[in-house]
Image (cartoon, rainbow, N blue to C red):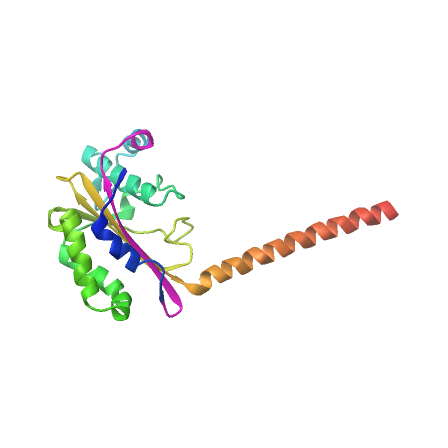
Amino acid sequence: MKYLEEARLDWANAAMSEVSVGDRVLNGRLECFSCKKAGADKKLAKSLEAAYIQSATASGSIGSLADANTRKLLINLISTMNASFPDYDFSDLKPEQFKKEIDLRIVVNSINTQLAEIVEMDDLSFLEKLWESIFAAIQPRDCEIYTYIPDMDGCSDPFSEGTLWSFNYFFYNKNMKKILYFTCMSRSIFSDTDMEDDEAMEMEDSEMEDYDEGDEVMNVMDW
């Protein structure tokens, strides 16, 4: 998926970056991608297509993998996430982890509710300007809209590691051959501290083990 520069979204990305809200930090971003594949995308699409054909009985609200259009859609959604989060691999996601949204108004209200804390810190014009920018970039009324539902049980992705809540919406405009990906997550400011404490404890345990092993060697040598 080719990343598309959208200057009209820059202000929104800046406004939603590392927003401190009490004991939480919000991070959101809007990115546009072309559905045209090249290089690694083609290789990934080919491998996923082969895997999906073997799992043709699987299905979800986005459709059945027996349908070539559903397979193409799922590949586009996964490729978008891989492009947006290059440190993660979403290739194993299943169709049931994506949901098709049927009402744009519900999507807008849901996003507005989640971003209410940012609005309180700024002003009501934030949401108005946000949606003006989104409509200019992707024309949501002409889009199919999908959302990703993270699997919080043992899933290693940016939405399950210390995240309090997150949303992931894909505005897919087939005529434009373009996807606008809107992702946002809220984390506790204590989650990073807890991780650092765990890492420090692991290092201390490792050093103690090395120290104990050294003592054993010295005792054997003395003996």
**x then y, percent, for residue 148:** 28, 49
Task: Indicate whether residue 29 is drawn in magenta.
Answer: yes
Q: How many marks?
A: 0
Q: Does residue 181 appear left or right of residue 174 in this picture?
A: right
* Quadrant in which residue 16 is drawn: bottom left
**Does the image show residue 172?**
yes
**x then y, percent, for residue 149:** 30, 51
**Does the image show residue 223?**
no
Q: Does residue 164 appear left or right of residue 121 in this picture?
A: right
Residue plotted at (23% across, 49% down): 7
Q: Does residue 162 appear left or right of residue 134 in this picture?
A: right
Between residue 5 and residue 66, name the one nearer to us: 5
The residue range painted magenta reads 21-45
Residue plotted at (34% across, 31% down): 40
**x then y, percent, for residue 201:** 59, 58
* Quadrant in which residue 59 is drawn: top left
Between residue 87 and residue 16, name the one nearer to us: 16
Query: Could you tell me which quadrant the N terminus lies in?
Result: top left
Image position of 72 with respect to 105: above or below: above
**x then y, percent, for residue 99:** 23, 49
Image position of 94 with respect to 23: above or below: above
Task: Indicate whether residue 215 is drawn in magenta.
Answer: no
Residue plotted at (28% across, 68% down): 117
Between residue 147 and residue 11, name the one nearer to us: 11
Residue plotted at (59% across, 54% down): 202
Q: Does residue 190 appear left or right of residue 223 in this picture?
A: left
